[in-house]
Amino acid sequence: MFGLGLRLLVLLKNTAIYGAKFVKKRIIVALDFDTPSKALNFLDHLDPDLCRVKIGKELFTAGGPDLVSSVVNKNFDVFLDLKFHDIPNTVAGAVQVASELGVWMLNVHIAGGSAMMKAAKEALSNSHGRPPILIGVTVLTSLSKEDLFEVGVNKDLAEHVMNLASLAYNSGLDGVVCSADEAKLLRASFFRDFKLITPGIRRAQDSAGDQKRVISPSEAIRNGSDFLVVGRPITRADSPRDALVEFNSEIETL
Ligand code: C5P
């Protein structure tokens, strides 16, 4: 009974009523800007009830924690994409400080090992209020089989991703960042509440840019992804607001 109540609360937190519609906030808009003012001006075009946002290394380096707080204060759920990877004590401290900024989700590199991931999870358990979702980075999608071989990994890529995701799961992480292909594989192997976050999303009319493999929003959701990270198709659209509405409507019935 308590479990059902908790699930209902989470569903309500993840869903906004917009007009007569329920909008599940599954699009995470990547704020890949080089100054805080560009990011904050851009956010005037977006409604925090219709999407979440991602702050990565570029914007964080430019704007720091003050910028994160400003975005949180505009009522956006913030995914702080800093991909922490260090000794357990250092990562535990970093995620705790990030949690105090009020971020919704943050991430670490799974390659940092189970002790590091457990220390991060443990640090978040001391958060005031609801702790941020903690996810792991498996293999950067920019790395080829040859790149991995150079750093001593000579396994099949899918097997390597699966091993890393299992390590994250067993270390108590809440999910992983993965490509849409990997999402299909991982969704078949993990419980539904293990979150899959997928970048490289494009509608039919969008250019791929530098992404090597892209997938449509509906296909990514069908593959089992929970959240889709979308950058340029929204940030560089003539009307970011309209682009976001289109992304949401493509997946609203899925
Ligand atoms: O503009 P675009 O939609 O390609 O942006 C995708 C976002 O997702 C960027 O912030 C990029 O850094 C991030 N990302 C990615 N591929 C990964 C991990 C993160 O594109 N494997």
Image: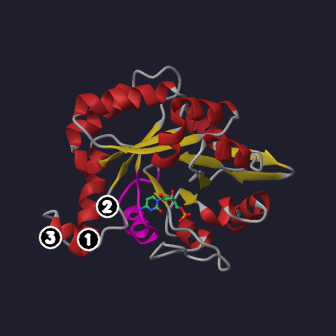
Identify the disc placed on residue 154.
3
Mark 3 to mark 2: distance in Å?
Answer: 13 Å
Give the residue at x 57% y 29%: 66
Q: Are marks 3 and 2 in contact (CB under 8 Å)?
A: no
- Dot 3 falls on a residue whose secondary structure is loop
Figure disc tally: 3
Tag 3: amino acid: Asn
Identify the disc placed on residue 157.
1
Who comes first in sequence, dot 3 or dot 2?
A: 2
Q: Which residues are magenta?
A: 176-192
Inspect the magenta stretch and tell me whether residue 184 lies in it.
yes
Q: Is residue 212 left or right of residue 189?
A: right
Who comes first in sequence, dot 1 or dot 2?
A: 2
Q: Is residue 16 left or right of residue 27?
A: right
The N terminus sits in image quarter: top right
Mark 1 to mark 3: distance in Å?
Answer: 8 Å
